[in-house]
Amino acid sequence: MDAGELENALEERSKNRWWLCTLFVLASSPGIFNSMHITSYVFISGNPKFWCDIPELRKANWTDEEIRNISAINPQAEENCFMYKWNYKYFEQIGFNESVNYVQNNKKPTEVKCTKYLYEEDFPTIVDEWDLVCEYGTLKSVAQVAVALGKFFGAFFSACLQTKFGRKKCFVFSCFLYIVSGPIAGFAHDYYLFLVMRLLIGIAGSGVYESGYTILTELTVKNHRTRLGCLYNISYSVGLMILPLLAYYSNNWRELQYYLSFPAVILLVHCWLIPESPRWLITQGKFEKARNLIYGEKKVEIKLDTVHEAPQQAATDTTATRRNTNSQFNEVHHPWYKRLFSAAQRLLKIFASSELRKRIIICYFLWFVASMCYFVLALNAHNFTANKYWYVALNGLSEAPGYVLPLLVLAFVGRKLTGTVLFIIAGVALLLILLLNNSVAIMVVALIGRFCMSAVFAVIILHTSELFPTSNRNSAIGTSLTMAQLGAIVAPFIVDSLGDIHWSIPSTLCGVTSISAGLLILLLPETRNKPLMDNLQEIHSIKSKEKVSCYNCFSFS
C-alpha cells in the first residue's frame, strides 16, 4: 500500500459520516477531562480568610470569631500569619469577656508565628487541608504547576511512545493513567503524593490529547482535516461548562476530585474502539494490518483509482517496498546518544541564520504570551471577585466560538492582521479592567480577552508553520509549544503571588504583554497565499520585504 492508495482509501472511508463523527468523538472527547482537571484549581484551591488556631481556647468552646479577635494582630485582615503571645491558658479559665478587658488594659505582648490555622470558607480546599498559607503559600500554586509540568514532560514522552509503540498504545496508556491517578489524587492524605498524582494527570492529559489528535489527522483526508483540527478543542469548552456543575454539587475538594476522576472509566470504551493509525502501521512495515484497518469487511467493495498490476509484479513490488521500509528503519536504530546529538543538531538549525533567529524569537514570545494570558484568565476568578461558578462556565461558553472564528476569518484575511487584531483587542480589554468597579462588567471584559486568546492560538500555530522551511518546521512548532507550556507554568504564580499584592496586576500584566505581542506580529512577513519553503537556502534567497523588518508593519499581503 503506497501513499496514493492510502489517500484514496481514506477518502472513500470518509464518505461514511457516521464513521467520521465517531472517530472525531473518540479522539477529542477525552479533552473534557483534560480541561476539567486543569481548571479544577479554581475550586480545589482557594483564598480563605484565616487566623491562628488556639487549641486552649477551642477547648473552652470559644467561637472562631472570639479566637480571632483576641489573638490576631489585625482581626479584620484576610490573612493573619502571626498572633499575640498572650497567656491563653489563663484566658481559657477567665472566659472571653474578662479576656477582652485584660487585653485592653495591658501592654501588647510579642508577636509569634502561628503553628496551626483556622479558616473561614464554605468549600474545604487543599489550602486548609495542608495549611498552604503564609510561608507555605507558594505550595498552593505548585499544585497547578504540577499539572503544567506534567503536560510539558508528557508532550515529550507522548512523542516517543507514539513513534516507538504506535498512536493507539500511547492513547490507551494515557487513558489508564487518567483512570488511576485521578482517584488517587482525591484519596491522597499526603501533599506530595497529591502533587505526584497531579503531575501524572498532566502527563496523561498531554498523552491523550496528542495521540488522539495524531490519530484523527492521520485517519482523515485534507478536506476534513482542517475543519476537524480546529474543532478538536471544542471538548475543552464542554469540560469548562461541566466543571462548575460538579463543583456546585460537591461538598469539598476531595468530592470534586472524585466527580472529575471516576467518570474517566468511560475512556475504556475509547481504548477499545479507537483505531490505530494506518500511516504508522505502514511506516512499521505492517501493510496487511493497515489494509485490514482501512478496508475491513468491505475490502472488495472499495474501488481505488490505482494502476492495476499483474499479481506477480504487485507481489514483487510489495516485497521490495517492505524491504526498503525495513531497511530505512534499521538505518535509524543508532545508539541513543547519537540520536540525541542528531536531534540537537536539527533543533539548533532554527537558529542557523539571522532571519530564522528573528522569526523564532518573535514566535516564542507570541506563544508564551498567548498561553500565559489564557491560563491567567482561566484561574483569575477570585481576583475579579466574580462568582467562580459562573466565571468558569462562561469561560467555556466564550471559548467555543474562539475555535470556530479562525476557520471563517483566515479564509479571507491574512495571518498578520488577524493575529494583531486579536492580541490587541485582548490587551485593550484587559487594561480596561483598571477603569471598572463592577464585578459583572469586569467579568464580561475578561471573557472578551479569553475569547481572543482562544482564537489567536489557531492563528499563531498556522503562521508559525508557514514562517519556517520544511526542514525546520517541526522544530519551530515543537519548541514554540515548549514556550507555551512555560507560560502555563508561570500563570498560577502570577495569579496567586502578584494577585495578593493587588488584584489588578495579573490582568494588567497580561494586557501589556498581549498588546506587545500584537505589535511584534507586525514585524513578521505575511504568509497567506505564499508557497511554503522547503530548505534553508530559500530563507537566504528571499526578498528583503519578506524578511522580519519594520517595513512589514504596513504590509498585510
Image (tube, helix red, strand yellow):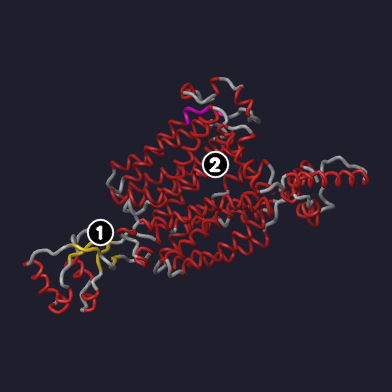
| Horizontal side of residue 370 vs 345, given as left or right | left
- Secondary structure, mark 1, is loop
Task: Give neighbour class at mark 1: few <14, some 14-19, many 20+ (Cα, 10 Å).
Answer: few
Q: Quadrant of the C terminus?
A: top right
Kindly indicate the quadrant of the structure image that contains residue 253: bottom left
Dot label at residue 479: 2
- Distance between mark 2 and mark 1 Cα atoms: 41 Å
The stretch in magenta equals 521-527
Q: Position of residue 322 (x, y in %)?
A: 82, 47
For the point 37% across and 67% down, the residue is 129
Residue 303 visible in this rendered orientation of the protein:
no
Residue 164 counted in the magenta span:
no
Q: For the residue marked with disc 1, what is the amino acid? A: Glu
For the point 24% across and 63% down, the residue is 113
- Secondary structure, mark 2, is helix
Q: Position of residue 241 (x, y in %)?
A: 47, 56
Task: Give neighbour class at mark 2: few <14, some 14-19, many 20+ (Cα, 10 Å).
Answer: some
| Horizontal side of residue 450 vs 330, given as left or right | left
Residue 508 visible in this rendered orientation of the protein:
yes
Query: Which residue position holds label 1?
Result: 78
532 versus 323 height, above or below: above
Front disc: 2 or 1: 2
| Horizontal side of residue 75 vs 527, given as left or right | left
